[in-house]
Amino acid sequence: MSLSQVLQVFAVAAIVCNVATLSLVAVRRRGRNSAGRGVAVGARAVVGVAALLAAGATLGSLYLSEIAHLEPCRWCWFQRIAMYPLALVLVVGWLRRDRGVHLYGLPMCVAGAAMSTWHYLLQHFPDLEGATACSIASPCAVRYAWEFGFVSIPYMAGSVFVLVGALLIVSRHRS
């Protein structure tokens, strides 16, 4: 599979994350109006899905840098600093059946989503950050991927951070 095909698969996955997030929000809003309806899913299962998403994003970013040889920029590294431990925390929390795992995961999701949003904005408006902020070898405004006219790597990461955060909020209410 070529790099462009892999990036297309990742872009579709990001859009699926967006649809899942919107669906989750819609179900939660509707659930408040019609108590007792819907499928009951336990907090542990929700955390398990969140852990799989974070682990998948971690493996995806490692694929892009270590196998596809795309050099991560400064903001990519910041997002990795949030995503990699998030995956580990969620897997351990899921294995230990920790009902408070959202307390550890949500701050990482919020920070990661904020960094992804800023990085995505830099790709649209490179002048937002001075020329000295990113390296010449790996500038932050470069778009290694630009699928469907809007999906870049920071967009992909942000999509996962937001969905995982939403799932952790749901798990908090179910535990």
Image: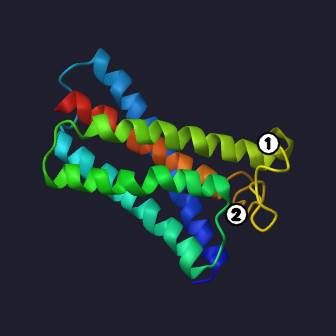
Residue at 16% across / 43% down in the picture?
A: 98
Q: Which mark is residue 129?
A: 1
Q: Nearer the viewer, residue 130 or 17?
A: 130
Q: Position of residue 21 (x, y in %)?
A: 45, 40
Q: Position of residue 52 (x, y in %)?
A: 33, 58
Where 62 sits versus 116, above or below?
below
Q: Which mark is residue 145?
A: 2
Where 7 sits versus 165, above or below?
below
Residue at 57% across / 51% down in the picture?
A: 78
Mark 1, mark 2: which one is toward the viewer?
Answer: 1
Task: From the viewer's perspective, tell me whether residue 86 is left or right of residue 73.
Answer: left
Q: Of the residues shown, which amino acid type is indicated by label 1?
A: Glu
Q: Nearer the viewer, residue 59 or 103?
A: 103
Labels 1 and 2: the sequence-earlier one: 1
Disc 1 is placed on an element classified as: loop
Q: On the image, which quarter does residue 136 sit in?
A: bottom right
Q: Nearer the viewer, residue 65 or 50?
A: 65
Residue at 76% across / 45% down in the picture?
A: 122
Q: Position of residue 26 (x, y in %)?
A: 41, 29
Task: From the viewer's perspective, tell me whether residue 37 is left or right of residue 79.
Answer: left
Q: Of the residues shown, which amino acid type is indicated by label 2?
A: Ala
**Quadrant including the N terminus:** bottom right
